[in-house]
Image: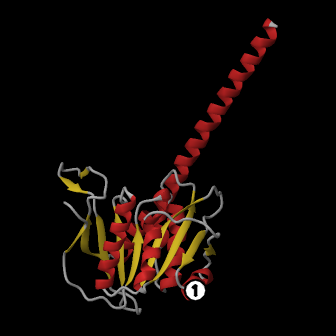
Amino acid sequence: MEKTIIKKKMEIKLKNPVLIEGFPGLGMVGRIAARYLIKQLKAKKLADLYSPHFPYYVLVNKKGSVRLLRGEFYFWKNKNGKNDLLLLTGDQQAQTIEGQYDLASCILDFAENCGVKMIVTMGGYRKETEDAPKVVTVSTNPELLNKALQAEAIASPAGNPIVGTAGLLLGLARFRNIDALCLLGETRGYLRDPKSAESVLSILQKILDIKLDLSGLEGEISKTKEIMEKMREIEERRETYAHKIRQMEEERITYIS
């Protein structure tokens, strides 16, 4: 494979489609949100994206068969609204700068061919927080940004870089007259963060005027809380042990002197 390719599984005509992207990243926020959206809407597979810019390994399933890493396009027909959805997620991001640009360009080519005039990218925003994660937003269109702010997202600080596919799609979309919005859920970043993904989807459904049942994320949120609690307990035990060692060292030095 010498270049990025997209293999369509069917031909479909979409009504004013909006592209929603969620690749792996900080806290896996974008990917969790995109996959939940696909499952919740019962979206259908439209195409697969393969690229030599993805990492060089294959995935093995329970039956022992393998497949290449890929991106996946799904579509959802919105019977009650004005916008159908084109949904994109994937196994990994491109591993080089050139690969990131190539992948983003191919995604935009495909989106344009599907009639997309608006893109929403999703990801994580690194921040230590104990409260409900907020959603940080930026946009290439002031009206779209205002719509996100009215949905209770908060404006991104100036100078904040958005790396990877979520950022490049925004930047490159401007050259194609496609409006673009980014929603970043606050996350510590080092664990899967379904709570942050829930916050992102809560904002997204208001912007798109669709109804989502987010209760299906609660099980994964509870598991993440349990993992965090165990990590805290381990850290507390480590600190207690380290403190005892320091005390013993201090007592030994005092005795000798």
Percent position of residue 224, x then y: 51, 53
Label 1 environment density (alpha carbons within 10 Å; few <14, some 14–19, many ≥20): few
Q: Nearer the viewer, residue 197 or 112?
A: 112
Q: Which residue is mark 1?
A: 142
Q: Is residue 125 left or right of residue 10?
A: right
- Above or below, comparing residue 132 to residue 107 in the picture: above
Residue found at x 53% / y 85%: 141
Q: Nearer the viewer, residue 61 or 250?
A: 250
**At numbered mark 1, what does the secondary structure look like: helix, strand or loop?**
helix
Percent position of residue 109, x then y: 31, 78
Percent position of residue 56, x then y: 27, 50
At label 1, which amino acid type do we have? Answer: Pro
Q: Quadrant of the C terminus?
A: top right
- Above or below, comparing residue 87 to residue 233 in the picture: below
- Above or below, comparing residue 157 to residue 14 in the picture: above
According to the image, what is the colour scheme of the structure? secondary structure
Percent position of residue 182, x then y: 51, 74
The total number of labels drawn is 1
Q: Is residue 75 visible?
A: no
